[in-house]
Image (tube, coloured by chain):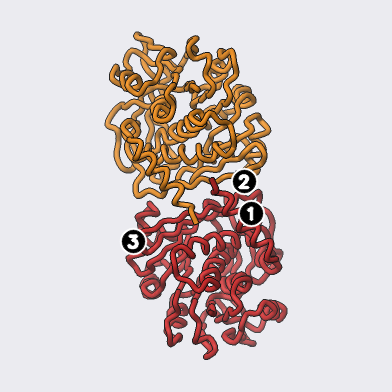
Chain colours: A red, B orange
Amino acid sequence: MSLLVVGSVAFDAIETPLGSTNGKIIGGAATFIALVSSYFCPKVNLVAVVGGDFPKDAIALFRARGVNLEGLQIKENEKSFFWAGKYHNDLNSRDTLITELNVLGDFDPIVPESYQDCEYLMLGNLSPEVQITVLKRLRKRPKLVVMDTMNFWMRPEVLPELKTVLAQVDVLSINDEEARMLSGEYSLVKASKVIKAMGPKTLIIKKGEHGALLFGPDNELFYAPALPLEEVYDPTGAGDCFAAGFIAHMAACKSTSFEDMKRGVIKGSAMASFCVEKFGTERIVNLSESEIADREQLFFDLVKV
Amino acid sequence: MSLLVVGSVAFDAIETPLGSTNGKIIGGAATFIALVSSYFCPKVNLVAVVGGDFPKDAIALFRARGVNLEGLQIKENEKSFFWAGKYHNDLNSRDTLITELNVLGDFDPIVPESYQDCEYLMLGNLSPEVQITVLKRLRKRPKLVVMDTMNFWMRPEVLPELKTVLAQVDVLSINDEEARMLSGEYSLVKASKVIKAMGPKTLIIKKGEHGALLFGPDNELFYAPALPLEEVYDPTGAGDCFAAGFIAHMAACKSTSFEDMKRGVIKGSAMASFCVEKFGTERIVNLSESEIADREQLFFDLVKV
């Protein structure tokens, strides 16, 4: 089984109530997803684009974790995507300070021949146009297509493109605010019905510190708690780590069943809980198997009666 | 085993985004707690006060459900406590439109001799002064004292009284906003430590549609989900029904163990989920045993992997 990951590989600069990155660090949806997936999936194939300014040691880090970089374009004379943001005290809302699209502005994704056999596809947060192109360039539809996106792609002027992708994915992973925006419904139960009618048979609604809801194709419902934490240093990438834990679990089990999805949501929650403990990718690059297993166990114990 | 319940028995007038009560209906913390507890506890003893305006059929309803009313004072020439409020669209916040203390203004609680053997005490939301008086008038300390309160009693001018009660209770049940206000900490994990240092060895933090957290005396942690609902008609009384399900479960099991508390939190969550489906006490007065068992099972299934 192999997993294909598409998304941004980029620079972030982040301020949170507990500190700041003091300049650029590496980030981007596909960075988090590829690094986290590599713990569970032996074959992670990356589709992304960076500029010549992207650090060689960051690229070496992907390689060291066994991520296949044949689909990573390096545009030497251009600059990598850059996002700077500042989180509010509640860590649920943030202000974007800088967005420099740079290489992402005209990203034409390459899907190498060696990726064509991929059975699991993670469409990380990125323009729906790029997401749909990747889907089109795969000759065989993967067994499971999971999509993550954000409110930015739900603006009226780009919504039709988002809906085109939505019609072709199996699982959509978004947060509660985005689910309300996309559906026009406040109740998440009602929102789930509206969104499922747009295409994805399965929907994950992430609620940050309040856990995640998984709505299955046959009206199954599952609630994964979040681990109550003393401090959250930086929520950036938590949603990507969540999606990564989810799809990597499905790929590792070679499954598309709802029962496995429930465990996937727990694995995703566990990986997200590591992510927020430090800035950027700092916490997720050097996890041991036992650390991951212990963290997952905490999630199981949290709701055990 | 017997349960003593103290709290308001009163009138409410409620507006929510889905409708309004069109005038006064019966409400009050002890009304919800006594009615819900009566499903699980054969001996529920009420300590409360109403005016001559309180409907005789509401009093008959308590009797019909086996609630002992020896401690219910009826002040014929006075009026019952009345609260009117309007909920905002998110149902998590509300405006108080009217508060008429009436009989609650100088409530001097009577604890009849027949209540003296009570082993479980539920201090429903009410002035800390009344809560402490009830505790004092019990010659033998109950096995388990659970307290519910609200932000109104956390104002600087009444906080010392609240802290006097807190020092004497086993379990405190409050919502997330109140936990933050009482502790001065945003993180609920940190808040729990500050609040536990005030007295209660066990703390329940209710998070509305996001479930509830139970912090145990030995740093145990349990997360009970909330049932995602299509519509919430009226959140009034949900916290009281939650507390009732919790303490009635403990009383029914004759237990004070953390393991039983976990199930108590699930039972409380289930009873609260009924409460919000209709206005006031409408949904909780005629539940069947199988309805309750089925609802509880939904909560267990929701997190089952």
Q: Between disc 1 and disc 3, whose residue precedes?
A: 3
User: Does the image show residue B120?
Assistant: yes
Indicate the quadrant where residue A167 lies: bottom left
Q: Chain of mark 2?
A: B
Residue type, numbered disc 2: Ser
Q: Position of residue B172 (x, y in %)?
A: 57, 32
Mark 2, secondary structure of its residue: loop
Are the residues flagged by discs 1 and 2 in contact, CB closer than 8 Å?
A: yes
Q: Residue at x 62, y 24 (%)?
A: B168
Front residue of A208/A101: it is: A208
Mark 1, secondary structure of its residue: loop
Calculate the distance from the C-alpha at mark 1 to the C-alpha at mark 3.
Answer: 32 Å
The residue positioned farthest toward the bottom in the image shown: A113
Residue at which label 2 appears: B187
Residue B31, numbered label = none
Q: Chain of mark 3?
A: A
Residue at which label 3 appears: A194
Indicate the quadrant where residue A13 lies: bottom right
Q: Position of residue A219 (x, y in %)?
A: 36, 59
Residue at which label 1 appears: A232
Q: Position of residue A20 (x, y in %)?
A: 68, 60
User: Does the image show residue A207?
Assistant: no
Q: Residue at x 62, y 82 (%)?
A: A51
Q: Chain of mark 1?
A: A
Calculate the distance from the C-alpha at mark 2 to the C-alpha at mark 3.
Answer: 34 Å
Calculate the distance from the C-alpha at mark 1 to the C-alpha at mark 2.
Answer: 9 Å
Residue type, numbered disc 3: Val
Q: Position of residue A270 (x, y in %)?
A: 59, 59
Q: Are marks 1 and 2 on the same chain?
A: no
Task: Give above or below for B200 relative to A53.
Answer: above
Indicate the quadrant where residue A295 lies: bottom right
Mark 3, secondary structure of its residue: helix
